[in-house]
Amino acid sequence: LGGPSAGSAMPRYVRVNTLKTSTNEIITYFKRQDYTYLGKARRIEELSELGQKKGKKFLQDLHVPDLLAFPPDTDFHKDALYLAGHLILQDKASCLPALLLSPPVGSFVIDACAAPGNKTSHIAAILQNKGRVFAFDLDTKRVSTMSTLLLRAGVTCQELANQDFLTVRLDDPKYQKVSHILVDPSCSGSGMPDLMRVHTDASSGPEQEKRLQALSGFQCRAVSHALSFPSVQRVVYSTCSIHQQENEDVVMKSLEQNPDFRLVNALPSWPLRGLNTFPESSYCLRASLSDTFTNGFFIAVFERKSNQNESST
Ligand code: SAM
């Protein structure tokens, strides 16, 4: 894959909320509004080509079912179906964690750092609103935003808590059946180009190193806490950071501290893999504007070793 290319542009991604509608219905809806449907992408490069285009056209994504891609200047903020919660504006990379967590319909799931809840609503859609999603967040305002967004998205299987995930008790009977956990914690945001423009002062030097070490310490604690729930089978860890300290280093330490777990080879067809810093780091997945036409992102999928059924997804 090529390195950063000057012409890289990111399509506008739209996730179809299958709790309210279907991808076929939405494709018909846009066709009726004079959008040209270019079909389902067969190569990832088609997303880059779309990222250079303007006008009313769209593709179906090749990796994430129920994800559509439009030219970058497409604005959905006033679209009736967006306002009604049928469409979720979500970057492609941030759709991958719920997809890779893939909890079976009816399961009990924890979303450890959940607000504003885009991944929570994606998990609920995968669960078809059956089972339970316990969604935690430390930030009161963000929990309130999440509550509004989940209502709009038609999510009914959630239980929200304005609580530090690290204080959630492993022996609480409520969580004894939790089999799947998503850990999408606070991170440097270095994969988000807009955020980084704001924080350029802190993007290098000893201050940056200190900040990354603090984030990384919290991220390790959050992953280890998730891996300690009694019935947990699968944990997905994700960040919108490009830094090894918050990504591969966290995964390596978590594996060392939790020998009952191994990595799953996440989405083997995905082109950009974890940095080669420890055995099986290539099982992790990275995303970037230049290689995958998304924001910068990182994902690792842990599974309990006794679970013989799955070794790649
Ligand atoms: N998963 C969210 C989504 O897709 O909409 C985005 C989560 S954001 C990257 C990280 C979140 O972690 C923030 O909302 C922050 O308030 C929350 N957070 C930070 N520390 C936490 C903790 N100890 N327990 C629970 N939530 C925490």
Image (cartoon, rainbow, N blue to C red):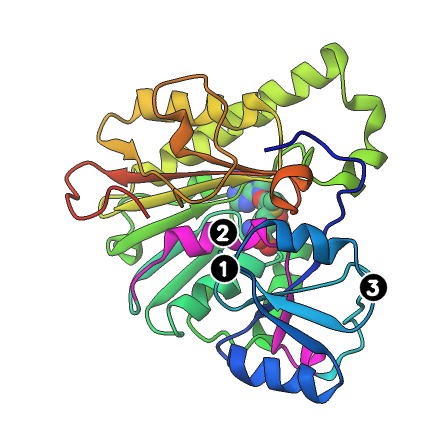
Residue 126: x percent and y percent? 40, 67
In this figure, which residue is indicated by the disc labeled 2?
96
Residue 138 vs residue 307, the one in the foreground: 307
- Is residue 259 depicted above or below 151 in this figure? above
Between the residue at mark 3 and the residue at mark 2, the CA separation in whole angstroms equals 26 Å
Q: Which residue is mark 3?
A: 54
Q: Amino acid at mark 2?
A: Leu
The residue at 24%/41% (across/down) is: 311
Which residue lies at the image location 79% right of the left edge and 22% below the top edge?
202
Which tag is nearer the camera, tag 3 or tag 2?
3
Label 1 CA crowd tier, 10 Å (few <14, some 14–19, many 20+): some
| Residue 98 at x, y percent in the picture | 45, 55
Q: CA distance from mark 3 to mark 1?
A: 23 Å
Pointer 1 residue = 64
Residue 57 location (% of width, % of height): 73, 71
Is residue 21 visible in the rendered image? The answer is: no
Q: For the magenta stretch, what is the residue range?
A: 81-104
**Secondary structure under badge 2?**
helix
Please name which of the two marks, 2 or 1, marks the residue nearer to the observer: 1
The image shows residue 161, relative to residue 284, as above or below, that is below
Q: Earlier in the sequence, mark 3 or mark 2?
A: 3
Labels 3 and 1: the sequence-earlier one: 3
> Which residue extends farthest bottom?
32
Q: Is the C-beta separation of discs 2 and 1 under 8 Å? A: yes
Identify the residue at horizontal 66%, vertical 15% (top origin).
210
Disc 3 element: loop
Please name the residue shown 40% across and 22% down the image.
Answer: 252
Instruction: Count residues near mark 2 (Cα–Cα under 10 Å), then give few for <14, some for 14-19, many for 20+.
Output: many
